[in-house]
Amino acid sequence: MSFNDEFELLLRARYPLIYIPTAEEERVEAAIAKSAKHLSDRPVYIWDFVDGYQGNPNDAGAARRNPLQALEFVEKVADNAAGIFILRDFYRFLEDISVSRKLRNLSRRLKSQFKNIVIVSPQVAIPSDLAEVLTVMDFPLPKGSEIKAEIERLLAATGRSLSDKVIDELVRSCQGLSLERIRRVLTRAIASHGEIQPEDVELVLEEKRQTIRQTQILEFYPTTEKISDIGGLDNLKDWLLRRGGAFTERARQYGLPHPRGLLLVGIQGTGKSLTAKAIAHHWHLPLLRLDVGRLFGGLVGESESRTRQMIQLAEALAPCILWIDEIDKAFSGLDSKGDAGTANRVFGTFINWLAEKQSPVFVVATANNIQALPPEMLRKGRFDEIFFVGLPNQEERRSIFELHLSRLRPHNLKSYDLERLAYETPDFSGAEIEQTLIEAMHIGFSQNRDFTTDDILESASQIIPLARTAQEQIKFLQDWAAAGKARMASRDSRLSSRIQRQFQ
């Protein structure tokens, strides 16, 4: 259902108080005006703190600098008259007892009238005493058709044209930005060289990064890691490589649905986060990192609004990779959290989106503690696949040593005994192998020489791997994976052999 369809439904159902969190004032007011015209040309009144009511010459300036009078104005309009009253930035006055009480009184009175109060604000800030009377509506970011129309309007103003391919690329780049930001970045391009050029896509991407940073929910994460930078995990690599073209139009014509995502479960330091970065780089898609803790706010409805904003932004930027690191920490112990059910509602919104999303947002979630994850997260349909990323076997440890040493000492790689290093570091994770090499470099640097195989082995002897300090947790994870609860990321490992024996 489109915004206008949903908004008109609320008006017909006589919802008295509607709250629309958006920074796109001009665009949302145009959408409301369109709905008002569609509903027997209802009059629209717009109020802000500085200018009061505007648009109607008889009421110009009414209730200037007085939010309570702005509400009293609604009562002055005849009971049998219809009207939509838009109040800009009104969230700043909701804590005032007189304003709050007046709104609750109006919510009862307006149910029998064709009047609706619409609060348009850049953020959700609803006091608890108004939570029951205010209906929050999402206002989506502009669709591709709106963006294309705006680009063509600006091109017409410059008297220039671009090929359909370049326009489509610009539209795709602009998705996820407000219409005002799109106008701003494109007029900046026009001011710079008198026209819109194909190279201006980079300007759009920088504006997009700025927008994402300002939300403080998602982080635009640059990626340089490649699939080849991952040591081992051959099953996982093969799975990813087979889906490399799954976001193309050719895949849609073939009938393939968009890939949904991956849940990577396993021991810390085994390359789960590295895999998320490598997927984005290999598939040439933007990587958005979500810190789930940032979804939770202190005001009523704020957490749910941030969750919807995150989903809206991710879908607007699609196709993209949404990386959720250590998701187990965010949604552990939902029933025991004393937050009046906020965490459960956020989790419910997120989990429903995972199951029902149609947009090409590929979710890569990582988890270290499978016991902390709610069972709903593991149900089929949330993710395409659940992979277990265990400790690297000897062959994989050799690959990890080779990857790091070819980067650190490409001219001297053959002087290191990779087979011995892999054999002498049982139960080491990839992160622990990297730390071993750093420690060996310190040894060599302190003695004014290059580090050797013996230095690496000496460093390894001083490191106690996680496999020994967290034996119970790791054993639980390995037993869980061995029971067939997840697919093995590694093709040939001790755990894989153990599973094969189990099913013989």
Image (cartoon, rainbow, N blue to C red):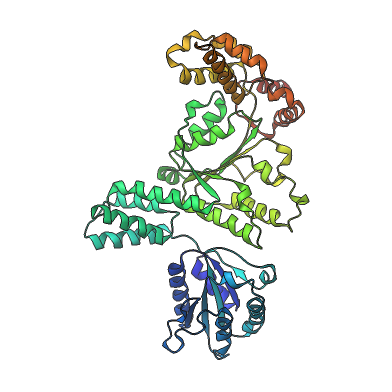
Q: Position of residue 474 (x, y in %)?
A: 72, 28
Residue 233: % across, % down: 57, 26
Instruction: Looking at the picture, tell me which residue is in the foreground, 48 or 395.
Output: 48
Query: Which residue is depicted at the point 42% across and 43% down?
Result: 248
Q: Quadrant of the C terminus?
A: top right
Give the residue displayed 37% in from the left and 50% down from the top: 204
Q: Give the camera-side residue of 284 and 238.
A: 284
Please say if 441 is above or below 18.
above
**Could one spot residue 90 in this view of the protein?**
yes
Q: Quadrant of residue 104?
A: bottom right
How far across and down, in percent of the image, does residue 291 sit?
A: 59, 46
The answer to whether residue 491 shows anywhere in this view is no
Q: Position of residue 232 (x, y in %)?
A: 56, 23
Q: Is 60 displayed left or right of 77 in the figure?
A: left
Residue at 64% x, 54% y: name it.
296
Above or below — where is 143 with respect to 117? Answer: above
